[in-house]
Image: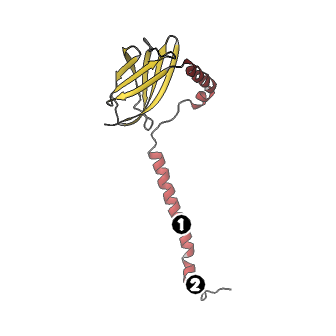
Amino acid sequence: MMTEETARKSDRWIPWMIVGFFVVVAIFDGIFVYLAGSTHTGVVTDNAYNRGLDYNATVAAAEKQAGLGWKIDLDLKDGSNLILKAIDSEQRPLQGAVVRAEFKRPTQDGYDFDVAMTETVAGTFETPVSFPLSGQWDVRVFVQWKQEQFQQSKRLVVAK
């Protein structure tokens, strides 16, 4: 049996080390909770449940789109001019198509916008784009031609 006289001096501060460890863990947990709540950008999926229910329809539409054989080439020239070239499965331009581009910022909500594209030559569509912020942007183009629809997405990096 140990008495107070035979106990080592370090035995007195070991319980305080354990308490100190948990205090440090609690402080870091508090910092992480604060950062998680204060840096949320608000980017969430609206109606996630309903979008999940539409999964089979989405898969069917993607298969139909793949069967069209269209080729869409999307490019951003000089950081401010979006150019889309579209051809069908027989390498003919999609002349007279209706094209719309939708821009979303993947890291921050509130800056999304969309623009209509104008056909400059057969199968080539252009539009000037003014990005409110530099950085990453996701562009999704919607092409409608002869009762068929096609969409394609691309991630762009805009420098200012």
Check disc 1: other Cα within 10 Å, few if <14, some if 14-19, many if 20+: few
Check disc 2: other Cα within 10 Å, few if <14, some if 14-19, many if 20+: few
Disc marking residue 8: 2
Left or right placement of residue 61 versus residue 31 in this view: right
| Residue 100 position within the rendered picture, expressed as x and y whole percent measured from the top left | 43, 20
Pointer 1 residue: 21
Nearer to me, 58 or 53: 58
| Residue 102 position within the rendered picture, expressed as x and y whole percent measured from the top left | 43, 25
Q: Is residue 128 above or below residue 2?
A: above
Amino acid type, mark 2: Arg
Judging from the image, what secondary structure is the residue with disc 1 in?
Answer: helix
Amino acid type, mark 1: Phe
* Colour scheme shown: secondary structure
Q: Is residue 74 above or below residue 39?
A: above
Q: Residue at x 54, y 71 (%)?
A: 17
| Residue 3 position within the rendered picture, expressed as x and y whole percent measured from the top left | 63, 87
Nearer to me, 129 or 41: 129
Q: How many marks?
A: 2
Image quadrant in which you'd find residue 83:
top left
The answer for how far apart the CA atoms under marks 1 and 2 are is: 21 Å
Q: Is residue 1 above or below residue 138?
A: below
| Residue 50 position within the rendered picture, expressed as x and y whole percent measured from the top left | 60, 27
Quarter occupied by the C terminus: top left
The residue furthest front is 90
Judging from the image, what secondary structure is the residue with disc 2 in?
Answer: loop
Quarter occupied by the N terminus: bottom right
